[in-house]
Image: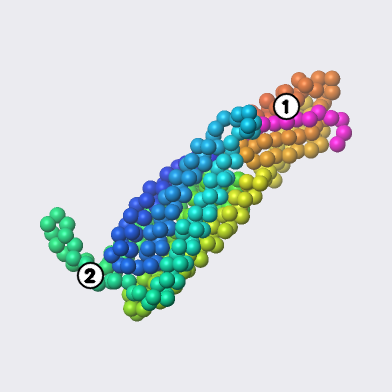
């Protein structure tokens, strides 16, 4: 799957996070809850992250030029790394700070009922009900976003588990959305438990600790994301599976007597291939190499560049 086919999961995540951020912000303002505020900031940060992922996809699709003869495919990795850093800074560190600040100040969320006025109708709204409604909506929206992301992953994972795909994938957009959605659902669960404990006991310590746990989850996930994307930025192969498939394909071609060496490099949604082969008929090496490259691109459309070196020894 190319970066462009990841846009569906990003669109779902963007709209889910935007709606969640709005309702969380309203709830945080009404309750003065630090863990709810941390969750609202996290959701707004996720919205910015999805915009950056879109930008990365657009940049990676730019055509090659004189300064970048292999194109801009790796631009998606750079912006994915920026997203991971934002998740670390705007999400994780802020949540840790907010939780620590609440712990030091001993400030308890204001959970008194609010007088609401809607279309001339006035009523008293118990804030615990509002909080539970916000959390329920957030869980539903994040679950829909995560299900879309998982569906896209299952279509290309080839039977691998989500963890294996996360570790092996060369598609930074999908692993970022997957990590964000999992972090969001985990954060919502923590916020729910911490606020429930604060409501039951009247002790703000639970709310503060909840915010710090949310921050810890975001920091941990962002660090794993940065590690995975860093590998892609400095240059990773297309993966053992695709290299083995390419080797079998090339060795079976009538133009090739022997494959000596094969190297791949993932360039965003595309792959660069370099190989050293012994042509079947050395006198017609040029024609055979041209034929081989046409066959490779027909069988593996993600291979955008191929460099075949003819030789009769390794």
Q: Residue at x 33, y 55 (%)?
A: 22
Q: Residue at x 54, y 34 (%)?
A: 61
Q: Position of residue 94 (x, y in %)?
A: 45, 62
Position of the C terminus by quadrant: top right
**What's the colour scheme?**
rainbow
Magenta stretch: give its range: 302-314
Residue 134 rendering spot, x and y as whole percentages? 32, 61
Query: Residue 113 got which mark?
Result: 2
Q: Are marks 1 and 2 in contact (CB under 8 Å)?
A: no
**Residue underneath mark 1:** 292
User: What's the CA distance linking mark 1 and mark 2?
Assistant: 74 Å
Q: Earlier in the sequence, mark 1 or mark 2?
A: 2
For the question of whether residue 190 can be seen, the reply is: no
Tell whether 216 sits left or right of 36: right
**Does the magenta portion include 18?**
no
Reply above or below: 59 against 279: below
Q: Position of residue 83 (x, y in %)?
A: 51, 51
Q: Give the quarter of the image for residue 269.
A: top right
Give the overall secondary structure of the magenta segment: strand
Secondary structure found at label 1: helix
Q: Position of residue 296 (x, y in %)?
A: 68, 30
Is residue 258 positioned above or below 207 on the image?
above
Q: Residues within 10 Å of mark 1 (few under 14, many from 20)?
A: many
């Amino acid at each position: 799957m190319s970066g462009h086919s990841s846009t569906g999961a990003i669109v779902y995540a963007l709209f889910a996070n935007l709606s969640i951020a709005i309702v969380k912000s309203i709830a945080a303002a009404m309750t003065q809850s630090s863990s709810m505020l941390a969750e609202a900031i996290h959701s707004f940060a996720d919205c910015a992250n999805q915009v950056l992922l879109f930008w990365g996809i657009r940049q990676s699709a730019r055509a090659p030029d004189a300064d970048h003869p292999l194109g801009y495919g790796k631009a998606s990795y750079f912006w994915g790394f920026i997203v991971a850093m934002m998740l670390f800074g705007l999400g994780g560190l802020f949540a840790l700070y907010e939780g620590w600040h609440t712990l030091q100040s001993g400030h308890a969320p204001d959970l008194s009922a609010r007088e609401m006025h809607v279309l001339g109708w006035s009523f008293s709204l118990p804030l615990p009900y509002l909080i539970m409604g916000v959390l329920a909506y957030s869980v539903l929206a994040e679950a829909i976003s995560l299900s879309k992301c998982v569906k896209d992953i299952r279509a290309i994972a080839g039977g691998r588990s989500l963890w294996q795909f996360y570790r092996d994938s060369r598609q930074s957009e999908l692993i970022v959305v997957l990590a964000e959605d999992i972090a969001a659902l985990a954060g919502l669960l923590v916020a729910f438990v911490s606020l429930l404990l604060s409501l039951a006991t009247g002790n703000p310590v639970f709310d503060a600790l909840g915010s710090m746990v949310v921050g810890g989850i975001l920091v941990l996930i962002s660090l794993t994301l940065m590690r995975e994307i860093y590998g892609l930025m400095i240059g990773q192969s297309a993966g053992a599976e695709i290299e083995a498939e390419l080797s079998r394909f090339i060795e079976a071609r009538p133009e090739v007597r022997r494959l000596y060496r094969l190297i791949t490099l993932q360039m965003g949604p595309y792959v660069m291939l370099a190989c050293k082969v012994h042509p079947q008929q050395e006198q017609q090496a040029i024609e055979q190499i041209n034929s081989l490259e046409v066959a490779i691109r027909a069988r593996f459309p993600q291979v955008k560049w191929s460099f075949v070196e003819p030789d009769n020894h390794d």
